Amino acid sequence: MNKLNLSKITKNLPKNRVDVVIFNKIDSTNDEAKRVALTNEFHVIIAEKQTKGRGRQGKKWSSPDSQNIYMTFCTENDLSFGPISLITGVICKNSIEKINSKINIGLKWPNDILHENKKVGGILVEKEHFGKKIKTIIGIGINLNLKHKESWWGDLSEFNLKKHRIELIVEIINSLIKVSDHTNKDWINQWKKSCVHLNREIEIQNESSLPNKAIFKNIDKNGNAIIETDKGLEIFQSGQINIKGIY
């Protein structure tokens, strides 16, 4: 089995800026990021298996020991310049396609990674406030080899990416560091080109209503969804609505 190797990961990272910890099993890499005190600019937690992996709104994220990617990148740097969930989606897409250019990754607002209209990955961004500091926690799950999955789940097993798992992890980490340095100014156009439902009819749902038909028109600079409903154009933040009918 192709186990994660700390030295192979760290040798291609800026050692003076990032610490990396690997767990064979953990409850949740995001929860560990909340517990840990940072001693470097960036801290990365990677696990072979999670027992309490989760996604947005507390949903369970299946995290078996199957050579997938379960990782969290955290920092106290100011990342308020843009919607980190959407930007991380672009990073994951670019990183996967850099490893194998034959893979066509799509993105669903606000945090889903898709292949052939199946969900193959997700992003969970959380923030911890203490004093004047804010710890930004970016959880990333990517299904490279998932044996048991729901009908809407997919994986990238046909491309045998598990052999390139370390390479993919390193590419994502280095790209997140570059974003922290504000080097990616074109994330909006990149995200829009990758969105699988831009200018398409979707269903939107919130806690108080049944799904309603609408058109996903655009996103703004803050990553909010601009959606055309029967009331005209409306702006929704992440967490206000769920988009249905994509997979």
Image (cartoon, rainbow, N blue to C red):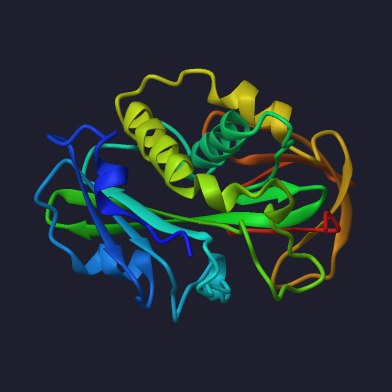
Residue 111: image location, x then y, percent: 59, 50
- At 63% from the left and 32% from the top, the residue drawn is 97
Q: Is residue 12 above or below residue 239?
A: above
Q: Which quadrant is the C terminus positioned in?
A: bottom right
In the image, farthest residue toward the front:
1
Residue 167: image location, x then y, percent: 44, 40
Judge by depth and name the residue closer to the eye, 227 or 125.
125
Is residue 137 at all visible to an observer of this figure? no
Judge by depth and name the residue closer to the eye, 189 or 147.
147
Is residue 140 at all visible to an observer of this figure? yes
Residue 89: image location, x then y, percent: 56, 41
In the image, farthest residue toward the bottom:
51
Tell whether 212 sits left or right of 4: right
- At 16% from the left and 49% from the top, the residue drawn is 133
- At 62% from the left and 25% from the top, the residue drawn is 190
Image quarter of residue 170? top left
Residue 88: image location, x then y, percent: 49, 40
Q: Is residue 113 above or below residue 233?
A: below
Number of callouts in the render? 0
Judge by depth and name the residue closer to the eye, 120 or 217.
120
Q: Is residue 167 above or below residue 239?
A: above
Tell whether 181 sits left or right of 94: left
Tell whether 209 sits left or right of 8: right
- At 50% from the left and 71% from the top, the residue drawn is 54
